[in-house]
Amino acid sequence: MLVTTERVVALRCPSCGKLGIHKFSLFSANGACVTVNCECGYHKLEISRKGRAMCVQTRCIICEEDHVSLVPLEEVLASDLLTLCCPYTRVDLVHWGTSESEVIQASQRLDPLSEMIGSVEESYFADREIMSEALRILERFADTGQLTCGCGNERINMDVYSDKIELACPACGSLLLVYAEHSSDIEPLRRLDGITLQQGAFECIDAVNYSGRSGTKHKPNE
């Protein structure tokens, strides 16, 4: 029987939210640590050999803690596709396997932020459906490199609240609040092709503050 040692892994970056597809060899994890970095530079995954198991460590995009999973080597070699999830929310975080096409197909369903919305009590969010749509739009921007800051930083932090999403640039301190409380709040977001935070500025996207323009840069106060 032919044993394939090449693996493909897919996971979202806990820092910028972008989905990444990466390749590595099980041989490279034998006695050494394989590290996976995001395009933004964030260190998001470590894979190493621990006895008869593979040790996978990643920072969770949901609870923001480091999770360590020990997967038996026999299971790693026998499985075409493995899924690792957050132990607290059971939300899928990592897909890895032997077939790039299967991992890519599985990764298209890898939507941890939307899954997190479904795991939270109905009463927490002002409008669960509006919040889910807002997160899907922002994830699409992050995946296509259309969520950036005017200072040149492409690593945008995201925090989710009951009625809004906070986007912050750790480099210059710019802050953008995306409100998701009413349908009218999210309508401006639907018209955008992307978002560029204004360097050092505080901005909002909602039904009141939006200027009505489409494009990749949002400057509601102009």
Image (spheres, rainbow, N blue to C red):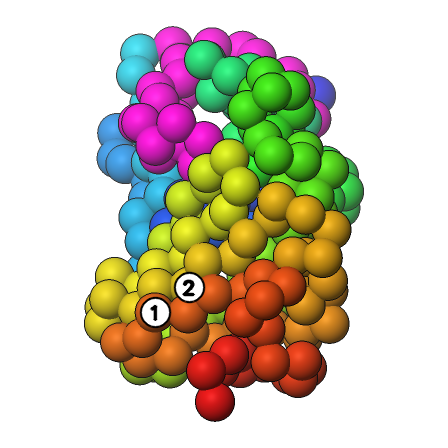
**Residue at image mark 1:** 202
Q: Earlier in the sequence, mark 1 or mark 2?
A: 2
Q: Is residue 135 visible?
A: no
Q: Which residues are magenta?
A: 52-80
The residue that appears at 35% across and 22% down in the rendered structure is 67
The residue that appears at 73% across and 62% down in the rendered structure is 187
Image quadrant where residue 125 sits: top right
Residues at circles 1 and 2 in contact by the CB criterion of under 8 Å = yes
Image quadrant where residue 175 sits: bottom left
The residue that appears at 64% across and 20% down in the rendered structure is 122
Comparing 57 with 29, the one in front is 57
- Disc 1 packing (10 Å; few <14; some 14–19; many ≥20): some
Quarter of the image for the N terminus: give it.
top right
Q: Secondary structure at mark 2?
A: strand
Magenta-drawn stretch contains 117: no
Image quadrant where residue 107 sits: top right
Magenta-drawn stretch contains 76: yes
Q: Secondary structure at mark 1?
A: strand
Q: Is residue 212 above or below residue 112?
A: below
**Residue at image mark 2:** 176
The residue that appears at 42% across and 52% down in the rendered structure is 166
Give how far across and how far down residue 73 sits, in percent: 47, 14
Give how far across and how far down residue 23 sits, in percent: 52, 48
- Disc 2 packing (10 Å; few <14; some 14–19; many ≥20): many
Q: Amino acid at mark 1?
A: Phe
Alpha carbons under labels 1 and 2: distance apart: 6 Å
Give how far across and how far down residue 100 sits, in percent: 69, 46
Q: Amino acid at mark 2?
A: Leu
